[in-house]
Amino acid sequence: MIYVKTESGQSALLSRSLALTPRQRSAFIMFDGKRSMKEVLKATEGLGITQDDVAHMVTRGLLVPISTANKVAAMVSLPGAPVIAAAPAPLAPAPQPQADRQDAQAHYSKAYPIATRLTAGLGLRGFLLNLAVEAAGDLGKLRELAPKIEQAVGPEKFRELENALYE
């Protein structure tokens, strides 16, 4: 699998705000969207880099698989390495009455952190679902993802999110 730095990963690298060990940082720099994980692991074998180190970088949102990157956002070339740019903002929805918008926003504000926590707790297995939750900008989109989240985490864990989305 080929990984590429995300925009936040590239920014953190440039500002030296990465919470990575020096050996992980060395490996992180090598993920340029051209080398496979196998090649990077082989090149950093002497440093002791493992697949767990790569998973740590993916979980922190510093790297994404190039196939995911193509689905999530457009590639942008910056000096040094390709970086994932933010996806273009969707068109604004039709205006809603003020009370409905406030109610929807209150549900969204309550449900979003729960959905993020549940999907992030799935690890790499739920990576794409976690990206979809983070991209969901309103209550309607979170509700569209609800069946997938329930299937991934199970009905018992989902109950908290269900209450936040629909009550």
Image (cartoon, rainbow, N blue to C red):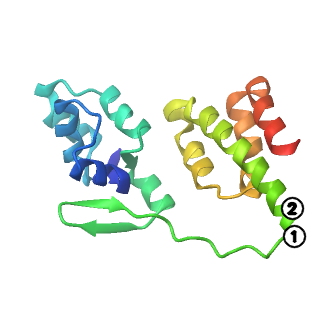
Q: What distance separates the C-alpha of mark 2 from that of mark 1? A: 5 Å
Quarter location, residue 122? top right
Q: Position of residue 140 (x, y in %)?
A: 77, 57
| Residue hosting label 2 | 100
Q: Amino acid at mark 1?
A: Pro
Name the residue rendered at 36%, 57% in the picture. 7
- Would residue 127 be found to the left or right of residue 109 on screen? left
Q: In screen coordinates, is 144 left or right of 50? A: right
Which residue is the extreme one toward the left? 46
What secondary structure is marked by label 1?
A: loop
Please tell me whether residue 145 is drawn above or below residue 53 in the rendered image: below
Q: Residues within 10 Å of mark 1 (few under 14, many from 20)?
A: few
From what the image shows, is residue 142 above or below residue 60? below
Q: Specify the quadrant that holds the N terminus.
A: top left
Residue at (33%, 49%) from the top-left corner? 9
Disc 2 crowd rating (10 Å Cα; few below 14, some 14-19, many 20+) is few
The percent position of residue 129, horizontal first and vertical second, equals 60, 44
Instruction: Find residue 142 and report its horizontal and vertical position in percent.
Output: 72, 50
Q: Secondary structure at mark 2?
A: helix
Q: Which residue is mark 1?
A: 97
Q: Amino acid at mark 2?
A: Asp
| Image height of 28 relative to 94, above or below | above
Locate residue 133 relative to residue 148 in the image: left or right. Answer: left
Determine contact: label 2, label 1, CB under 8 Å. yes
